[in-house]
Amino acid sequence: MISQLVTVIRSTLAFVLPPLVGMLWFLVCLPLGRRRAINSGIRVVTWLGLWLAGIRLQVEGEVALLEQRPAIFVINHQSGTDPIIGARLVRHDMVAIGKYELQFHPLLGPVMKAFGTVFVKREQGIGPQVLAPLLPALAAGDAVVLAPEGKRSSNGQLLPFKPGALWLAQQSGAPLIPVVLHNSGEILPAHGLLMKPGTVRVTVLPPQPANLTSEQLRQVFADALDH
């Protein structure tokens, strides 16, 4: 009973406090420049969110590639914690993609807008017409973080990959770097409300050719998840 109560309190704090603190920190740092304020805010939000929830990251593979800029980081999507995990891994000089409805969230919306998130409607998918606005960010030397499945898997199994990330790599020339989340679904399952403390295993893979098909890129993730 006590452990369950602790989980409820930690999970609630992890949802509520990080965006509020992150927005305040962003505003405090804004006189130093918008880019510096965003980078600092991302670090604060992601560190505080994972710490409060009791989530640790075990990162293996080509870890140094997380500093690559410009770059297109593609992640599989098992859990509601994946966006904060992805942002924690990449940390700076990045642009993320979020579903359209999140911009109206009273806590997450303001901080995501301040950090330059690109919001997309789920029915649009993640295709060229949606991703084209990200090309200037890549040309300026930023990283893009996106989930080619387009939405969260309800059972942990990989969904079909959409071609947008590959198109973005072809158009920009930026390396396409897979970041495999092995067990984030155990931390916050689909339709779950509470984040469970635990360690998420992450594998950073070598850059992949931009001329892969969507199914071939999906297979790269499937092979990594089998190990």
Image: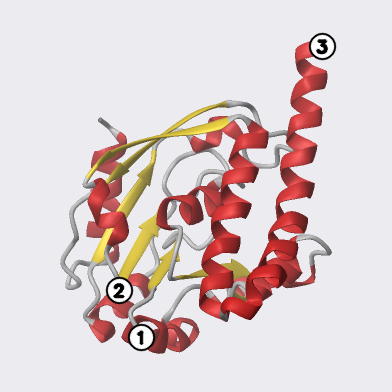
Which amino acid does the dot numbered 3 rest on? Answer: Ile
Q: How far apart, in angstroms, are the residues tagged by discs 1 and 2?
A: 8 Å
Q: Secondary structure at mark 3?
A: helix
Q: Compare marks 3 and 1 and give the one earlier in the sequence.
A: 3
| Residue at 22% from the left image edge and 58% from the top image edge | 216
Measuring from the top left, give residue 45's x and y in whole percent.
63, 53
CB atoms at circles 3 and 1 under 8 Å apart? no
Q: Secondary structure at mark 2?
A: loop
CB atoms at circles 3 and 2 under 8 Å apart? no
Q: How far apart, in angstroms, are the residues tagged by discs 3 and 1?
A: 50 Å
Q: Is residue 173 above or below residue 179?
A: below
Return the residue at label 2. Answer: 70
- Quarter of the rendering occupied by the N terminus: top right
Measuring from the top left, give residue 60's x and y in whole percent.
28, 37
Q: How far apart, in angstroms, are the residues tagged by discs 3 and 2?
A: 46 Å
| Left or right placement of residue 84 versus residue 133 in this view | right
Q: Secondary structure at mark 1?
A: loop
Which amino acid does the dot numbered 2 rest on? Answer: Pro
Which amino acid does the dot numbered 1 rest on? Answer: Ala
CB atoms at circles 1 and 2 under 8 Å apart? yes
Q: Residues within 10 Å of mark 3 (few under 14, many from 20)?
A: few
Return the residue at label 1. Answer: 140
Measuring from the top left, give residue 107's x and y in whole percent.
79, 60
Q: Compare marks 1 and 2 and give the one earlier in the sequence.
A: 2
Whether residue 101 is visible, yes or no, is: no
Residue 222: quadrant of the picture? top left
Whether residue 34 is visible, yes or no, is: yes
Q: Residues within 10 Å of mark 1 (few under 14, many from 20)?
A: few
| Left or right placement of residue 170 versus residue 149 in this view | left
Judge by depth and name the residue closer to the eye, 84 or 125: 84
Q: Compare marks 3 and 2 and give the one earlier in the sequence.
A: 3
